[in-house]
Amino acid sequence: MKSPSDRPFMTKKFAELNTLAEACFQSKDLGLLGAIAHELRFRDKSCSKELLRKVEYFLSNPAPQPKAMDFTTTPKPIKFSNEQLDIIERPASARLLVEAGPGTGKTEVLVGRVAHLISEKHIPASSILLMSFTRSAVTEMKSRISARCKDKDVAFLSAMTMDSLMFRIGKDLGHDAQSLFESFDGNVQTALNAIRIGNPHVSQFFSRLRHVIIDEAQDVLGVRADFICALIGLLGHECGMTVAGDPLQSIYGFTIEDDELKDDDVVPPPTRLWSSLLSFDISFARKRLTVIYRVGTDSLKSHFEKIRPLVPENGKADKATYASLKKAIEEGKPPVAEQDLAGQSTLFGNMVHPNDMVLFRFKYQSLLSAHKTERVCRLRFSEYPPVVFPWLACLFHDRDITKDALISKSDFDILWAERIERLEDKYVFLSCGHNETTGWTLLEALAPGRDGHVDLVKIRTLASRPKPPLELTVPDFGIDGPIFSTIHSAKGRESSGVHLFLPDHDDPYQEERSGTPEEQIAEECRVLYVGATRPRERFHIGNTRFNYMEVPRRLMSFRSGRKTMSAGRYRGRHRSSSCFRIQIGLFNDFQTQDIVSRERLGTESAEELQVALVEMAGEIKSTGNLLKVSLKKTKDNDNDIYHATMNEKILMRTTSFFSEELRAVVRKVGQNIKRDTFPPETIEPCYFFGLRTVSVPMDSAELGLLSKPFSKSGFYLAPLLSGYPRLKVGVKE
């Protein structure tokens, strides 16, 4: 243990050290800052580590004089309104049902509620369960709670999605991980059954809770709603609940997004948690957030307030109600473009900013529009592979991690300067908005090693997961440009600018959905409302018209989520066609190991191809145009395997998984036209959207196929490929 003479600031509290550090930033007293840094290295709390990072950064970059506020370790205090405080400061045992419209600060109120329970009511973080709809929402809320709780330890806060909670319960009940990944709804049913029979493992897990928070409750349906109702009966009377949502944004019931419909699926009318809680035996105090804070203009605020009363509250509506809501949304909003989906060149005019969202009702519309523009853009769909930061592969692709797993901050800075910062002007996309300081901070938080090092084995393991930590990924598929998405995929997101393409034709999936026509129309009203309330500053309207009548007809659906549609051209009644569209680029569509294989398919070496991929991504960024990729068929073990080829370079092969689903679509087309059919020889156009890091697990057999140095590091770059081409089946004579 160090003596007090070695640690002159040992007795100083953190607040005193923070104040002293701020004074040193102003006076540029590097000697005193060095002594402060020395003391902070002995402290483990997150606030001390954060201040240490800032002190070390200042010591290595003393020239720019930072403002004191740049180095504060706590966020600016939020001045909550009375209606918000009425929710935040309720007793821990209170049970609240909070209705919160778009932009009314629901997330910040829930964060404030948890922070108040921990900091003011002294409820242990381990006794609070927070559930939200998506991993990104959970990560964001937990980060904000950590910032609000100052010195309080929130590491043991149970913040997760419901699927994650069900997975955890399933593991406690003795189920193996493989079976738990097979059916998420089945996991919920298993947990529900365990509660009903009084399983002691489940009862013990929930008995420690003193408060439960459920976000986006309007979208908790079916067996999930049944589980929450059973959970309420299991919780003790002293355990409070805060359930928040907006029933006017419930869009996952009767008219679920079309890609979620599977062949032979029967979707029963769902149990809705929101309506169940209104009639629950244990009464919930109803609260409402009404003041809109999100939007930055009075006109948008007025727009939000104008359309909300037009959304049906009773779950049923007629076509006149839908038409009046659609008209109100359209009024006073400039059109996105006069052209249609077949040629939206004007979509990328000056009005569209790089981070704007372009929203459609159906996925086929979004896919068709994004790929027909041939301009740099991003896609927001869950079935694409996660985009792990490309700078990981750039930094560590040639490092033998099996022998040299730990990296120091100084070595990291040197690598960053040589491989990222030096190329920043031409390849700015590689950094994904990070610099050497934020990149190191991220890795250190996820995989701390000995003596202030980062453990790259841990990073490699995390990045190789099917769902890597969100902190290591880009949220969308692509490197730049507006984000193309469905309204459903944009749920819970917002953007400074939104371009909403309203449907102007009949729903092609209406006959396949459950619920009465009135219930379906009511939910379509809610879908429009969600789409129209995503913007913060700019809002534009477009229509999904076609130059030619390519009437959408779903061919078949897959558990993978792949979108397939018939693509015949029609002038009158619907007729069968030998043409179809198929979505390309899903998680398991390509054999990415081909890129760095010991037996390369092309003439370039693995190292040369890695350099070429970076140059291609740079061309996308500089020209603003996507690069075309062709898939050319070759025979491989009697499977229809395609080579992905770009600029005469063979990148990688498609997988048997892709071939099986392609052949299934081709057979379906053959049944429709009553002919024997086979897959096309060439699939094009597909497009190169950017780069991602692929990480191979330490124990993977795939490592034996890779060339050096990639077999030693386990990191390499892979292209982001996507397509939605119009193809024609071959017909056997």
Image: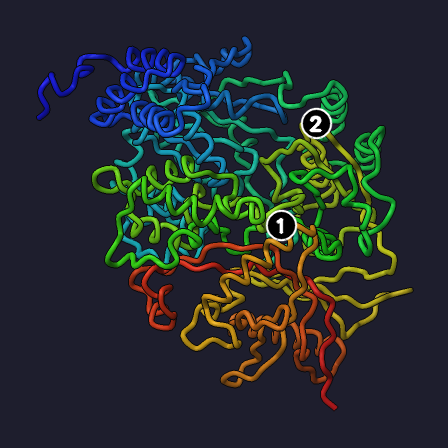
**Residue at (75%, 20%) from the top-left corner?**
302
The quadrant in which the C terminus is found is: bottom right
- Let me know if residue 277 appears in the view: yes
- The picture places residue 724, in percent across and down from the top left corner, at 68, 62
The reply, left or right, for residue 667 in relation to residue 468 is right
Question: With 553 as the anchor, is 644 left or right in this view?
Answer: left
Helix, strand or loop at label 1? It is strand
What colour scheme has been applied to the protein in the rendered image?
rainbow
Task: Depth check: give the residue in front, 18 or 499.
Answer: 18
Percent position (x, y) of residue 432? 52, 43
- Give neighbour class at mark 2: few <14, some 14-19, many 20+ (Cα, 10 Å): some
Residue 269 horizontal/vertical position (percent): 60, 46
Tag 2: amino acid: Glu
Label 1, on which residue?
379
In the figure, residue 201 lies in which quadrant? Answer: top left
The furthest residue to the bottom? 733
Q: Nearer the viewer, residue 566 or 616?
A: 616
Check the image and report above or below for 567 versus 318. below
Q: Residue at x 51, y 66 (%)?
A: 609
Q: Nearer the viewer, residue 198 or 667?
A: 667
* Residue hosting label 2: 537
Q: Position of residue 370 (x, y in %)?
A: 70, 53
Residue occupying the point 33% across, 20% down: 238
Dot 2: what SS?
strand
Q: Is residue 464 above or below residue 450?
A: below
The image quarter containing residue 195 is: top left
Mark 1: amino acid? Leu
